[in-house]
Image (spheres, grey):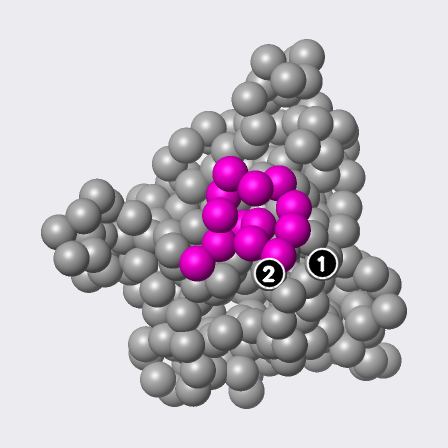
C-alpha cells in the first residue's frame, strides 16, 4: 500500500475546519489537550452537524470497544497497522491491530472516549481506519463490506495530535474501485490502471494539539493518480475511512465522534 500524496491545490475547498477557518473566533488548548473557545461554542462543534438521522453516526467511541456504533450489526470496526516493521528499523505502532477507544484526558465537551494511535518510523504506510462492515459475500471468506452513502454529503469528525507528533496526516475514503474487497482492482499491482489503494482523500489542514472539528465533503476529495482513474468517489460503495499517518517520523493522533452528514 502506498501512502497517498494529495496536491495542495484543492485543500481549501476539500476540508473545512469547523474550529477557526473562515471565522473570527479562536480556540486555545487547555493543559489536558481539550479546546476552550474564546466567546462562542465552536469548541463543542457545529450544532447544524448533529445527526437528525441516527444512522448518520459512524462512531462516537463511547462504548468503548473496537466495534463502531454503526457497525455493531454489520461487523464494522477500528484497526491500526503499518508496513512490515522489518522494512524500517525501529518502526512501531500502538495499538497494532484492533483499536479500542481510550479516555480523553480531561474529556472534550461531554465526550469521554476517543480513538488514539501512536508510533513512529514506518517507511511506506501506517494507518488507523474504520470499516463500515465485515462479513461473507456469497459464502466466501470474510472481507470488508460496502456501504451505500450516496445520499450523504460527506463525513465529519474531531481530531488532534500530541505534543511530539507530526501533523502530516491525511484522511482517505475507499470505494469498490480502490479497495481490494471490491473485486475490481488488483492488489498485486503496485501502480497502473488496475492498482488498488488510490483512494480519494485530502490532508487534514490546521491539525494541531487543539481539538478541531473537520467537515469533509465527498466532492472535495481527489486521488493521487497511481491507480484506477475516475472522476469522483463512488459513494454508493464505500468500504472504510483511513487516517494516513506520517512516514518516517513520530505520530500521535486522536480521533473522535465521526459521522456522515
**Residue range of the region highlighted in magenta in the rendering:** 184-197
Which quarter of the figure has residue 251? top right
The secondary structure making up most of the magenta span is loop
Distance between the Cα atoms at labels 1 and 2? Answer: 8 Å
**Which residue is denoted by mark 1 in the rendering?**
225
Q: Residue at x 71, y 58 (%)?
A: 225
* In the image, residue 204 above or below residue 55: above
Q: How many neighbours does mark 1 have within 10 angstroms: few (below 14), some (14-19), or many (20 or more)?
A: some
Nearer the observer, 2 or 118: 2
Q: How many neighbours does mark 2 have within 10 angstroms: few (below 14), some (14-19), or many (20 or more)?
A: many
Nearer the observer, 100 or 24: 100
| Left or right of residue 191, residue 134 in this image | left
**Which residue is denoted by mark 2 in the rendering?**
228
Q: Secondary structure at mark 2?
A: loop
Q: Please identify the quadrant where the N terminus is shown.
A: top right
Nearer the observer, 64 or 215: 215
Amino acid at each position: 500500500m502506498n501512502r497517498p500524496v494529495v496536491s495542495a491545490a484543492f485543500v481549501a475547498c476539500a476540508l473545512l475546519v469547523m474550529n477557526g477557518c473562515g471565522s473570527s473566533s479562536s480556540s486555545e488548548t487547555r493543559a489536558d489537550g481539550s479546546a476552550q473557545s474564546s466567546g462562542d461554542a465552536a469548541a463543542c462543534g457545529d450544532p447544524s452537524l448533529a445527526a437528525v438521522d441516527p444512522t448518520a453516526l459512524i462512531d462516537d467511541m463511547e462504548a468503548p470497544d473496537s466495534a463502531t456504533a454503526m457497525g455493531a450489526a454489520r461487523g464494522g470496526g477500528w484497526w491500526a497497522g503499518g508496513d512490515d516493521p522489518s522494512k524500517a528499523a525501529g518502526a512501531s505502532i500502538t495499538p497494532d491491530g484492533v483499536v479500542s477507544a481510550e479516555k480523553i484526558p480531561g474529556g472534550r465537551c461531554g465526550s469521554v472516549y476517543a480513538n488514539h494511535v501512536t508510533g513512529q518510523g514506518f517507511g511506506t504506510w501506517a494507518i488507523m481506519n474504520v470499516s463500515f462492515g465485515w462479513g461473507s459475500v456469497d459464502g466466501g471468506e470474510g472481507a470488508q463490506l460496502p456501504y451505500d452513502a450516496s445520499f450523504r454529503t460527506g463525513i465529519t469528525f474531531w481530531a488532534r495530535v500530541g505534543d511530539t507528533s507530526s501533523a502530516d496526516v491525511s484522511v482517505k475514503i475507499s470505494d469498490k474501485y480502490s479497495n481490494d474487497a471490491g473485486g475490481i482492482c488488483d492488489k498485486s499491482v503496485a501502480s497502473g490502471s488496475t492498482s488498488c489503494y488510490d483512494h480519494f482523500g485530502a490532508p487534514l489542514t490546521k491539525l494541531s494539539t487543539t481539538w478541531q472539528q473537520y467537515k469533509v465533503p465527498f466532492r472535495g476529495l481527489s486521488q493521487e493518480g497511481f491507480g484506477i482513474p475516475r472522476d469522483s468517489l463512488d459513494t454508493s460503495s464505500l468500504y472504510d475511512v483511513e487516517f494516513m499517518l506520517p512516514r518516517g517520523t513520530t505520530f500521535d493522533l486522536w480521533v473522535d465522534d465521526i459521522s456522515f452528514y
